[in-house]
Image (tube, grey):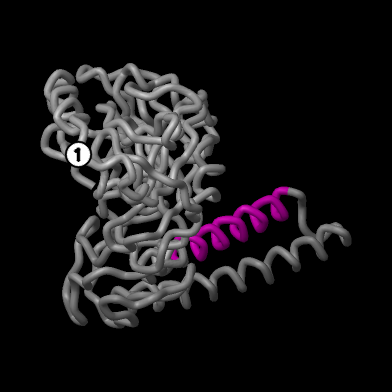
Amino acid sequence: MRRFFVPWHHATALAVLMSLPAVGRAADTPATAVSVWPVRPVPFAAHIETIGQVEPFQGVTLSPEIAGRITELDFDSGAIVRKGQLLLVLNDAPEQGELIRQSGELRAAETDLARARSLIRTGVESHEDLETATARFEAAKGNVARVQAVIDQKHIRAPFDGSVGIRQINLGQYLNPGDAIATLTSYARMRVNFILAEENAASVQLGQTVHLAFDTTPGQDFTATVTTIDPRIDGSHTLSIQALLDAPPADLHPGTYAHVSIAAKVAPHLVVPETAVTYTAYGETLFVEQPSTDGPTVTATAVRAGDRRNGWVVIDDGVKPDDRVVTSGQNRLVTGMRVREIPEALPLAGLRELAQ
């Protein structure tokens, strides 16, 4: 709801105008039916509001570590992939041929090593012959591992579960190291980055829960846990903070703006139902019940409203504890009118949540 801020003396003047008694009202005018609420202090957690931006918990731009031409392409834009899934293959025919040759040399070296170990027990070969055979075997094994590593580099796989973005390459295309293939993003968890003004730095701690709302999911509330607080206040006197959202909505995308709400210190505040406040261009007003010999009457009172949440409003100035304020029927009231109380269902569940 849009709020209008006007000088306090203007709001007071409006209340004075509204407080002028009705002219010509007969003493026996029937009392107007209204609902009332007894003002009292309740625990209220003031909330700090800021804007954050979503980023993936895991997100990379896939690119090759080695050059080559694409000979196999196993994914398309928007694909959901699993960790280790093969995405594409660069031409590895030379390496496959080399692997066959090196594997043959490894088998021969392994046979020679086994023979040397057998003959040294009979004294036919010396320890030097055994050492030579061992070195030849280890070198052959290393050559096989080296060629296999190149082949593995040319078989590009998903490093984690996620969703592939728009594919930037095509079958038969030649790639150089570092060329973009596509983005890969994990949506299982998200991070939300936001900043706080320097004076609010003490209001957030590691492990604290913050509340999030997104324009893409109106009416839904999500919670995230503060995981990182920058140890430095930057040059603009703000503090950078990061929170982890474990269960993001399915349609939440990186880059989306988040409305972040952080509960500050809990303290007693005077609150009234939001329906009790009359909003005008001149300020905010409450009708306060007054005792009278002819029955209770009401007085229009200028107030200064603060935070609003869950159907309740903090009143920073203008009322005191135990004042009884009208919560419904005030559109028919002026100061001095007699009223009679009728019951009304109020959002008491929301009242209990104000300390959260």
Examine the rendered structure and indicate whether residue 279 appears above or below residue 252.
Answer: above
Task: Identify the residue at image location x=40%, y=29%.
Answer: 290
Q: Visible in this render: residue 159?
A: yes
Q: Visible in this render: residue 271?
A: no
Examine the rendered structure and indicate whether residue 309 appears above or below residue 17.
Answer: below
Is the magenta region chiefly helix, strand or loop?
helix
Task: Identify the residue at image location x=12%, y=23%.
Answer: 10
Q: Dot 1 surroundings within 10 Å: few (below 14), some, or many (20 or more)?
A: few
Where in the figure is residue 115, as x and y percent of width and height? 75, 68
Examine the rendered structure and indicate whether residue 188 appears above or below residue 27.
Answer: below
Task: Identify the residue at image location x=51%, y=24%.
Answer: 268
Q: Is 295 within the magenta?
A: no
Where in the figure is residue 299, as x and y percent of width and height? 30, 31
Instruction: Say which of 271 and 118 sits in front.
Output: 271
Q: Which residues are magenta?
A: 128-147
Q: State the image quarter where residue 107 is shown.
A: bottom right
Report whether 216 appears left or right of 47: left
| Residue under label 1 | 3
Q: Secondary structure at mark 1?
A: loop
Q: State the image quarter where residue 20 is shown.
A: top left
Q: Is 146 within the magenta?
A: yes
Examine the rendered structure and indicate whether residue 271 appears above or below residue 1.
Answer: above
Instruction: Say which of 264 and 153 sits in front.
Output: 264
Q: State the image quarter where residue 153 is shown.
A: bottom left
Task: Identify the residue at image location x=32%, y=30%.
Answer: 306
Disc 1 marks which amino acid? Arg
Where in the figure is residue 144, as x and y percent of width and height? 51, 65
Report whether 226 appears left or right of 330: right
